[in-house]
């Protein structure tokens, strides 16, 4: 309990200045950077549906360790999602230290920020709001992945998005993740001075341009991918095939060719 108080107040129980807040800042920065990079990688993998259903199926099986286990093992995805969830909770706990403790504090900070007219302060408010939203939206998404790791694929994921009405959640989650993640990485670069160079002011301007470019890119990619899943889900619902497992085209073709060859030989 004393460590918790020390982390929030920045003082030990003896009243001395504590190093714990700095250590917690390191943890927050590390977990935040890790999650942001993970989400970008995750977005690229999810967008494989834009190439083809077979390609998305192949990516899914690779993540299930199909190069080790025949047909893949969804348990690997469950474990990975559980690890991400733990990192997610740790990062959220670290971030909550910086949030206002009550509405009155929020009003004071908001009024102060408005009088300053500081762009980076506005970005902090956006990050705080999206982080709060992500805590709930992200938890739901990770829970679904952990408990339904065997139902990930072109058809299975599309049915979940459309027929199980998950698309509104994914729209909100996509917006929250991309704004929170890109702002977070920008603030990490500024906080730790990674790219300051000889002119930190100009560096900040350049970093903001990169931040907005990444935000737009991943939002466009994310919405395009979501639209593709919704389209497949709509088609499945229309055709009455909701819940059907996806069968890769390559395997179907191989099966048909084999049958024809056998019949030909016979």
Image: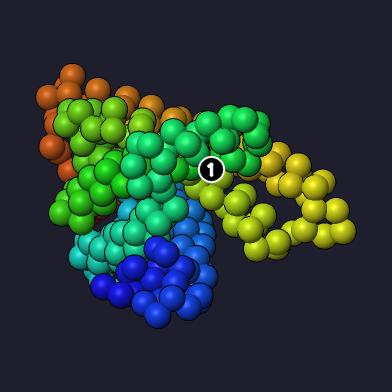
Of the pair 89 and 44, the residue shown nearer to us: 89
Q: Is residue 132 left or right of residue 121?
A: left
Coordinates of residue 165 in the picture (x, y in percent): 20, 28
Of the pair 41 and 69, the residue shown nearer to us: 41
Q: In percent of the image, x 41 and y 41: which residue is there? A: 105
| Above or below for 55 versus 215 | below
Coordinates of residue 208 in the picture (x, y in percent): 68, 41
Image quadrant holding the N terminus, namely: bottom left
Q: Residue at label 1?
A: 124
Q: In percent of the image, x 30 and y 75: which residue is there? A: 2
Of the pair 198 and 258, the residue shown nearer to us: 198
Coordinates of residue 250 in the picture (x, y in percent): 33, 48
| Colouring style | rainbow
The answer to whether any part of residue 2 appears in the image is yes
> For residue 116, what is the image quadrant?
top right
Coordinates of residue 79 in the picture (x, y in percent): 25, 66
> For residue 103, what is the image quadrant?
top left
Residue most extreme to the right: 198
Of the pair 43 and 84, the residue shown nearer to us: 84
Residue most extreme to the front: 15
| Above or below for 34 versus 133 | below
Q: In percent of the image, x 31 and y 47: which residue is there? A: 135
């Amino acid at each position: 309990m004393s460590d918790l108080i020390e982390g929030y107040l920045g003082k030990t129980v003896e009243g001395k200045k504590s190093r714990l807040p700095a250590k917690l800042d390191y943890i927050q920065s590390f977990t935040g950077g890790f999650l942001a990079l993970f989400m970008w990688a995750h977005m690229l993998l999810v967008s494989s549906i834009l190439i083809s259903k077979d390609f998305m199926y192949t990516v899914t099986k690779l993540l299930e360790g199909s190069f080790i286990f025949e047909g893949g093992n969804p348990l690997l995805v469950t474990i990975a999602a559980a690890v991400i969830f733990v990192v997610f909770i740790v990062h959220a706990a670290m971030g909550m230290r910086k949030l206002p403790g009550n509405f009155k504090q929020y009003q004071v900070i908001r009024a102060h920020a408005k009088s300053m007219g500081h762009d980076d302060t506005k970005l902090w408010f956006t990050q705080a709001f999206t982080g709060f939203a992500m805590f709930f939206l992200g938890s739901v998404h990770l829970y679904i992945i952990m408990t339904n790791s065997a139902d990930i694929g072109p058809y299975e994921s599309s049915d979940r998005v459309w027929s199980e009405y998950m698309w509104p959640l994914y729209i909100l989650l996509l917006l929250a993740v991309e704004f929170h993640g890109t702002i977070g990485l920008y603030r990490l670069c500024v906080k730790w001075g990674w790219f300051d160079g000889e002119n930190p002011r100009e560096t900040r301007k350049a970093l903001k341009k990169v931040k907005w470019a990444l935000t737009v890119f991943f939002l466009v990619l994310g919405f395009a991918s979501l639209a593709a899943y919704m389209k497949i889900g709509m088609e499945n619902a229309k055709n009455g095939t909701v819940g059907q497992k996806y069968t890769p085209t390559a395997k179907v073709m191989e099966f048909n060719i084999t049958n024809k060859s056998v019949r030909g030989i016979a």
